[in-house]
Image (cartoon, rainbow, N blue to C red):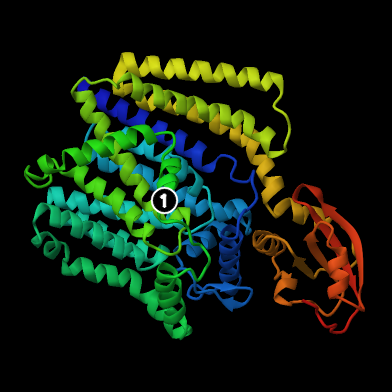
Amino acid sequence: MQDPKQFGERARRSTDLLALIAICGFLFFAGLQVIGLVGVDEPRYAQVAREMLQRHDWVTPVLWGQPWLEKPPLYYWCAVLAYKAAGSATGWAARLPSAVLSTLMVFFIYVWGRRFRRGMQLDAALITAACAMVIGFGRAASTDMPLTATFTIAMLCWYAWYESQNRTWLVGFYLSAGLAALAKGPVAALLAALILAVFAALRRDWRLLARTLWMPGVLLYALVTLPWFLAVQRANPEFFRLFILQHNLARYTSNIYRHQQPFWYYLPAVLLGLVPWVVFVLVALIDALRDWRYSLRQPAGKEDLRTYLAIWFLLPIGFFSLSQSKLPGYILPAIPAGTILLADFILRREQEGDKPGLPLAGAHAVLCAALMVAALVVPFRLVHLAISRPALIVAGALAAIGVLSVMASLRTQGYRMLRFTTLVPLLIAYALVLRGTAPMIDVLQSARPVQLTLSETAIGEITTVAVYDVPRALEYGLGFYRDQKIFSYERNEIPDGDHLVVAAAGSKGELEYRLQGRRVTYVGGFAPQHLDFYLVSGSGQPQARP
């Protein structure tokens, strides 16, 4: 006869896994194709992967036939595999690597939590998955989620070794750290070293770093990373200068890529990135900082997880706040530390029978309700329409129900209801976004509908396309969706023969001035993005005017 306790444990584990599959499937995979590739990076990275596939070259990233040495290859390799699985290089396939890796990260957090902090594993996994910044980058064709997933697994493996002294976890640390280096370069090793050094300093145990430098692990790290770095340097002698000196050191110490932001830039970025859990993450962080001295007086590996997570959360934010170049994705590796810290906080409060205070529960309830309201009204604002009366009524009802239900659940049932009461409004808001906001973003921001309209403009056999006075994102987006280089008038890349120009609306006079001697004919446009299409006829090399 089966032990009822074992049967119950298996049933709970099966339920947990089904919940993780359902949540990750919805948040990371549902509607990947609804929005075409947006921004500069998504279509550019997707095109690099396509060209590596076309060239059968797994060493040198290439864009329009030229080496593109800005990032290491892990994302590109994953995208190549996704293209092969999908049968073609599509936008949704380009996003698959991030979706798969974010799901892998969430499941690893669950397994790690079940092994080392039983009782918090499902909270840690689901809170991480259902976090605004993780959802956003988990659906993006970029290098940020590959770095974050591998870095998170590495840092959790290190702590598992620290607590258990089982070197199998140290193998996982070095393996994952090596993959993180292949995702975005030396920044992964630097961040890990800084976090571990600060933790060792607070514990006054410098031998901890010496024990971490385990020679078989170091060799494993070298085995993972060195083959590609050596191969790409051999194939491209300029790699060290471009990648290490320019795209890493110069990017950090100067504004060479024009991403300068104020020092406090990451404060609002991390607050928004932690939505909808931000209120409780801040409380958990304050709790960890308040008790860190007590935690570090306890036996190693028993009470200092909170200190470790707090360092892991705060250090990347501080490190990149000093950088002269700032982008939101830089602090993504810190987010899982905050969400796991919250799960540990919830477990502690549950064990003590504590319940959130009225101000805390109220602030969280208002935020959850605001998500649903925003999901309803944002589509109207995107197209500059007045919000309809039925939408206002529904938004008001959702807000009232959301605030009252979340507050009532937290005040009566305590912290054990936090996960459920937060996921319900989040999933409702997310479903509304996929149905209402996402299609509008596609029309207003992606090059995909522009390309579809452009392809319907019958101009004989003319396939060459240039752009003028449009965002760089459109240039790269058209390049991916047409699978061809797009010429830029701003860079004086003016084709000699007949070609199409995608330009800002009303640019005909400027084009005629720049192209004296050549005929410029309006042939269509794409009104949602304020674009005109022009046919430039004639041959030769006219003098381009500034």
Give the class, few, some or many, for how many residues have Cα within 10 Å of label 1's Cα (few <14, many ≥20): many
* Relative horizontal placement of residue 28, taking residue 219 as reference (left or right): right
Q: Quadrant of residue 121?
A: top left
Question: In which quadrant will I find the N terminus?
Answer: top left
Q: Which amino acid is tagged 1? A: Tyr
Task: Choose between 98 and 316: the one closer to the eye.
Answer: 316
Name the residue tied to disc 1.
266
Q: Secondary structure at mark 1?
A: helix
Q: Residue at x 19, y 68 (%)?
A: 216
Vertical comparison of 85 with 290: above or below:
below
The spot of residue 440 in percent (x, y) is 69, 41
Vertical comparison of 19 with 185: above or below:
above
Task: Choose between 437 and 5: the one closer to the eye.
Answer: 437
Tell me if I can see residue 111 in this picture.
yes
Q: Quadrant of residue 397?
A: top right
Q: Residue at x 40, y 70 (%)?
A: 253
Task: Choose between 150 and 2: the one closer to the eye.
Answer: 150
